[in-house]
Image (cartoon, rainbow, N blue to C red):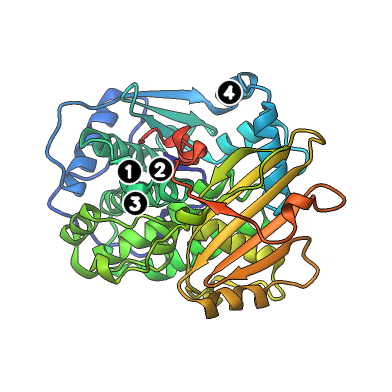
Amino acid sequence: MAHLRSSALACLLLMAAGACSDDCPTLQACDIRSLSCQLITFEVTQCVRGATPSRAIPAVHIVDADTFIDSQVDDAEPASDQTRAAQRGLALLGLFPDDADPAALVRARWNQIGAFFSSESGEVTVLDRSGDFDSPGAVITLAHEFVHSLQAIEGKPDPTRYRNTFDGQLALGAMQEGEAELYADLAALDGYGFDRSDVGFARIFRNFRERAWHEARDSSLPITLAYSHFTYAFGGEYINQPWRAEGRGAVRELLTDPPISSRQVLAGPIFTPAERPKQEDPDEVGRPLVGAPFEEVSVLRAGAWVFEAFRDRWAKNPRELSEYRDRGFSGDVLTILRDTESDEVAVIWRMRFDDADQAEEMLYALREETPFAYRRIDRDVVLAGTSAPEPPEALQGDLQWGDRQAPDPIAQAGQPAQLCELH
């Protein structure tokens, strides 16, 4: 999926030139509507990535973006009572607007997208917003989607590796989009006559990540748009760094045992998987046993990226990306409940840290006037909030806990990366 963004490459094309490649043919300035342009772009993309040549070039469709997005909005289903209750629970945390309109949510997601590859149809769709079919941006977008088509030929990743969770899907998306960013950018540099060694990738991705960090904190939809905010900028740097250090082979090796959580992606590429920060959702005590009249409406393993956005929204001192340090957030279970008698909602978020001091540090970082109750249980922090004027008796005192092993419904439904169609 190509993100509609000010890409790293837009900066690169302003730099001084010279040529360097993998002895591959090079991208050409061509009209992406033509089959000849698609064929050479596909050939270049395969070669730059080092993929086994394939005869299966995907069909490419170029559609008017406004017309396509309007059709998706028209098809938007009204939110079910369960979905609306889940959204109200996220709104309590400041992670969702209070009055979300389903059509507006669909439009917000698609407005981030420049193109996408569907593994179901095996086809690429480009959303045309400018009519510049032979611009560098159009060719680069096509190359990006061809990387996704090559990923699909190699087979779908094992969903159990990514724990069937929202957070795991973000990590998977970061690897897929990061690799597509890398090889589309390299193909473009070669094709437009730039020397790879002259490019300040570290600075470019630092700026890209800082922009994404702030966009996530300014957004009213940090969960809905998490895929757009996180995977390109942070996945792009994660994949680009080993390529800068050791070349394409290092990227392929890393992708044989990739990170499984947004925390591990945020930590940056670590070549020895055992050295990555651990991922440990508190599943064994993740189910709050509150009983009637409450019913569960949603369960989410939100992960470090969402947690960090939440933390800064309620922090005494919100941080710049340069101030971010891994503070031990190793996993979570976020449960949203609905009171069937009053229709009020409650959220119970159990967060696990590497040690008790880090859990205590998280509590200290938050403003005192947050509308939540907090409790530390060893190295876990439990947050509870409700839309009711007064906390129900079931949420007061010590909660009882049970095992929580079921996968996230949001991950099962293909979110947050459903538009990428690679799961």
> According to the image, label 3 marks what residue?
175
Q: Residue at x 67, y 78 (%)?
A: 364
Q: Disc 4 versus disc 2: distance between alpha carbons?
A: 26 Å
> According to the image, label 2 marks what residue?
164
Asked if the residue under mark 2 is in contact with the one under mark 4, i.e. CB atoms within 8 Å, the reply is no
Q: Nearer the viewer, residue 253 or 24?
A: 253
Left or right of residue 12, residue 308 in this image:
right
Counting residues from the start of the chain, the first of labels 4 and 2 encountered is 4
Q: Nearer the viewer, residue 329 or 419?
A: 329
Residue type at tag 3: Met
Quarter of the figure that contains the N terminus:
top left
> According to the image, label 1 marks what residue?
160
Other residues around mark 3 within 10 Å, as few (<14) / some (14–19) / many (≥20): many
Left or right of residue 299, residue 395 in this image:
right
Q: Quadrant of residue 119?
A: top left
Asked if the residue under mark 2 is in contact with the one under mark 1, i.e. CB atoms within 8 Å, the reply is yes
Task: Evaluate whether residue 96 shows in this view.
Answer: no
Counting residues from the start of the chain, the first of labels 1 and 4 encountered is 4
Q: Disc 2 versus disc 3: distance between alpha carbons?
A: 16 Å
> According to the image, label 4 marks what residue?
72
Tell us which disc is closer to us: 3 or 1: 1
Asked if the residue under mark 4 is in contact with the one under mark 1, i.e. CB atoms within 8 Å, the reply is no
